[in-house]
């Protein structure tokens, strides 16, 4: 089998045009598939990388997002005093937060888009321990100062440190820029929640409380205390679960679209592979018949044709995967988060798992595209084949 397969591969230079066409077709399929799925993978990572199992998010009971939640100040104090909450010299590690949407122009198009403006307390920098100030400083308590996420600064105009923007009824000074290990917080703008509340006529209400727990194991005790407290009507989730839920709808939609488009293209590549292999069998009719006359069975003939088809598909898969990695990995874009209707900046991610899956998809195309020509070659009557010119 291997001897015939190697002999078959040595004839590829004589059929290089058809082989090259098949390789390019499969490379296109793999490139599109990897490129689209890299969007979903990048968005999913942005939404989940900041999630920590020892951080809890508390919303109003029945609320699915921060936009639909509301908590009074007394409730936020009760949450901060709950068992399982970590503490330092300044008190419980908790941040009662406000979430509003503002409009800012995009750098690329100049059109306005929704940007999340989050009011936080100073405890937010301890609760979210991945926040790093990379330029300037933190905002000062009680002042109209804001800090911007690195992703928001790249995507939207006028968010450079030292500038001012007019938001709501106030003029805000940008005093710092922060990163969050590529997480969703980089798409946000942060301000002091006590300054943001009167600017948006929110009184003493908040929308969520982020709490640092003593450990991941303390979550259940913390949740039971709050959900059984008759004075409260709250929903408690781990931060990691909360962000994962928010990413599900978008990643599922993008993945579905990507697989659908790649499947349509795969049909074209499959017909291309079939045509290539049928042409290869037709060009080698006398050669195959001669091998059969010398005593080689149908099995080696089928194996040789399938080997060529699969190797061409793998070559196309490697070419398409490499091109997709070079073009898309790390490419930055933004899309809307359907949970908050605000823009999220993220980077495409071409992962080894994604490349492996795409290569497997290409191999499957090669197998399907080679099996029918291989069976035709194996069933070809010897006498008929020997008479072919």
Image: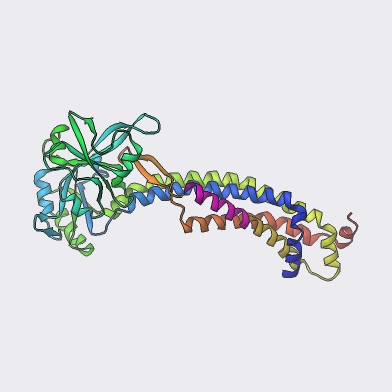
Q: Is residue 5 left or right of residue 116?
A: right
Residue 231 can be seen, yes or no: no
Q: Position of residue 67 (x, y in %)?
A: 25, 39
Numbered range of the magenta stretch: 314-328
Compared to 305, does 251 lie above or below? above
Q: Quadrant of residue 221?
A: bottom left
Q: Position of residue 274 (x, y in %)?
A: 70, 51
Q: Is residue 326 left or right of residue 132?
A: right
Q: Position of residue 315 (x, y in %)?
A: 62, 56
- The residue drawn where x is 17% and y is 58% is 222
Compared to 293, does 195 lie above or below? above
Q: How many marks?
A: 0
Q: Is residue 357 left or right of residue 277?
A: left
Q: Is residue 365 left or right of residue 122?
A: right
- The residue drawn where x is 20% and y is 45% is 137
- Magenta residue check for 253: no
- Magenta residue check for 325: yes
- The residue drawn where x is 56% and y is 57% is 359
């Amino acid at each position: 089998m291997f001897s015939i397969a190697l002999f078959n591969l040595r004839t590829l230079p004589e059929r290089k045009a058809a082989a090259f066409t098949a390789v390019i077709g499969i490379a296109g399929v793999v490139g599109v598939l990897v490129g689209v799925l890299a969007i979903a993978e990048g968005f999913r990572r942005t939404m989940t990388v900041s999630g920590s199992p020892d951080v809890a998010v508390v919303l109003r009971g029945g609320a699915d997002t921060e936009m639909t939640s509301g908590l009074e100040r007394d409730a936020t104090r009760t949450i901060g005093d709950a068992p399982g909450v970590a503490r330092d010299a300044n008190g419980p590690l908790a941040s009662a937060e406000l979430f509003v949407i503002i409009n800012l122009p995009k750098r690329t198009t100049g059109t306005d888009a929704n940007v999340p403006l989050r009011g936080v307390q100073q405890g937010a920098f301890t609760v979210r321990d991945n926040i790093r100030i990379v330029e300037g400083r933190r905002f000062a308590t009680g002042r109209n100062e804001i800090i911007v996420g690195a992703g928001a600064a790249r995507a939207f105009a006028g968010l450079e440190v030292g500038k001012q923007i007019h938001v709501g009824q106030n003029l805000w000074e940008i005093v710092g820029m922060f990163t969050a290990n590529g997480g969703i917080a980089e798409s946000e703008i942060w301000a002091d929640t006590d300054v943001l509340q009167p600017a948006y006529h929110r009184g003493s209400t908040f929308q969520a409380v982020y709490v640092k727990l003593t450990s991941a194991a303390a979550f259940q005790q913390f949740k039971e205390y709050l959900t059984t407290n008759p004075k409260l009507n709250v929903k408690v989730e781990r931060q990691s679960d909360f962000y994962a839920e928010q990413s599900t709808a978008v990643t599922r939609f993008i993945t579905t679209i990507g697989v659908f488009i790649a499947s349509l293209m795969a049909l074209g590549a499959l017909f291309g592979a079939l045509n290539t292999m049928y042409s290869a069998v037709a060009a080698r009719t006398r050669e195959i018949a001669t091998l059969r006359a010398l005593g080689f069975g149908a099995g080696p003939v089928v194996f040789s044709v399938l080997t060529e088809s699969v190797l061409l598909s793998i070559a196309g898969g490697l070419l398409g995967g490499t091109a997709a990695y070079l073009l898309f990995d790390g490419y930055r874009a933004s899309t809307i988060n359907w949970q908050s209707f605000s823009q999220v900046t993220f980077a495409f991610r071409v992962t080894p798992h994604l490349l492996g899956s795409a290569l497997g998809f290409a191999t499957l195309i090669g197998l399907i595209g080679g099996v029918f020509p291989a069976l035709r070659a194996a069933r070809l009557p010897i006498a008929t084949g020997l008479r072919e010119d």
